[in-house]
Image: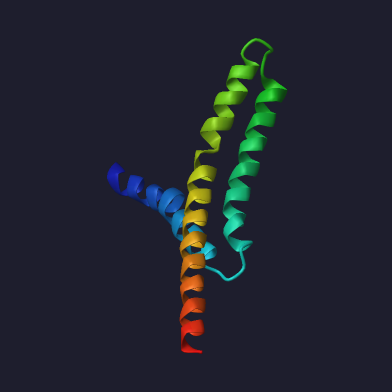
Amino acid sequence: MIFPKNIFFLLIFIVVPIILQVFLSKQNSKWPGLVLPAITFIFSLISILNIISFGNVINTVFLILTTFLLTNIPTIILITIYLSIRKSKKKLSEIEKMNIKDLD
C-alpha cells in the first residue's frame, strides 16, 4: 500500500504547483506568475544560509554551489512555464491587435 501514498505526494508536491503556476501565469498581470518562482528561490537561499551557518570551511564552497543548483531546479522549471505562457499570451495579444486593425 505504499504506491497510493507515492501518487498522493507526487500530486501534492509536483503536479499541484505546476497547475497553480500555469493558472497564475495566465493572469493579466505579470506579477502573480512570479510568486511561486520567488518562493522557491527564497527557499534555496535559506538552504544556502543553513549550510553557511553549519558547514566547515573545506567543503563549504562545493556544497553551496551544488545546493544552489539543486534547490533552484524547481525555480527554473517554474520560470520556464511562466515565460512560455507569457510569450504565447503576448503573441495572441499581437494577433488580436492585428485583427482589430484589419477590421478598421
The number of numbered badges drawn on the structure is: 0
Outermost residue, top side: 58
Residue sitting nearer the eye, 54 or 41: 41
Q: Is residue 60 above or below residue 97?
A: above
Q: Is residue 18 above or below residue 60?
A: below
Residue 64 can be seen, yes or no: yes
Q: In this view, does 84 lie above or below 46?
A: below
Residue sitting nearer the eye, 53 or 101: 101
Locate residue 44, reporting x and y percent.
Answer: 61, 37
Q: Which residue is drawn at 64% across and 18% down?
A: 61
Residue 59 figure quarter: top right
Horizontally, residue 65 falls left or right of residue 57, namely left
Residue sitting nearer the eye, 34 or 15: 34
Locate residue 73, reporting x and y percent.
Answer: 50, 39
Horizontally, residue 26 falls left or right of residue 11, namely right
Q: Residue at x 30, y 42 (%)?
A: 2
Q: Is residue 59 above or below residue 42?
A: above
Locate residue 40, reporting x and y percent.
Answer: 58, 45
Residue sitting nearer the eye, 99 or 60: 99
Horizontally, residue 46 falls left or right of residue 24, namely right
Q: Residue at x 67, y 36 (%)?
A: 46
Residue 43 figure quarter: top right
Q: Residue at x 55, y 25 (%)?
A: 66
Residue 20 can be seen, yes or no: no
Horizontally, residue 13 falls left or right of residue 63, namely left
